[in-house]
Amino acid sequence: MLLFRSEEHAERWTAQRRTPHGAFLTLEQQWELSRTWFEGRLDPNFARRTTEEARVVFERIGLAGPFWSLTS
């Protein structure tokens, strides 16, 4: 993960390096995704999320588009 001042800054950075970018998240979205995603990980009975459960997490946080689609 890289932090940028703006989407424009990220676009310039990736263009200069000729590398595609992934997805843009606000700091609030990143925090919510991290908090939600890792919740309960230390529980010995933790079960990995299903694809559908992950899709619901992404949707709730407002993460949409091809990058967040969990299909190949």
Image (tube, rainbow, N blue to C red):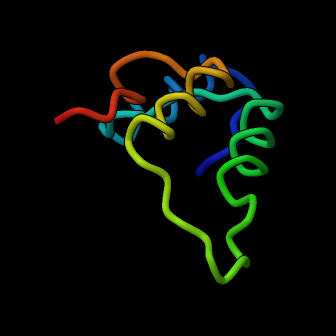
For the point 32% across and 40% down, the residue is 19
Q: Residue 59: where, in percent of width, then height?
A: 57, 21
- Observer-nearest residue: 11 or 22? 22
Where is residue 23 shown, x and y percent of the image?
A: 49, 30
Judge by depth and name the residue closer to the eye, 21 or 58: 58
Q: Is residue 17 left or right of residue 5?
A: left
**Total number of numbered discs in the rendering:** 0
Position of residue 28 in the picture relative to residue 6 (left or right): right
Q: Can you give x and y, in whole percent of width and height, for residue 54 in the image? A: 49, 40
* Residue beneath the point at 61% across and 71% down: 46
Q: Is residue 63 left or right of residue 17?
A: right
Whether 41 is drawn above or below 56: the answer is: below
The answer to which quarter of the image holds residue 16 is: top left
Q: 15 or 42, which is in the foreground? A: 42
Please identify the residue farthest to the front as the structure is shown. 45
The residue drawn where x is 66% and y is 22% is 60
Q: Compared with residue 51, is residue 7 higher up or lower down, i.e. above or below?
A: above
In the image, farthest residue toward the bottom = 44
| Residue drawn where x is 72% and y is 77% of the image | 43
Position of 48 compared to 34: left or right?
A: left
Question: Which image quadrant is residue 30 in?
Answer: top right
Return the residue nearer the eye: 40 or 9: 40
Quadrant where the C terminus sits is: top left
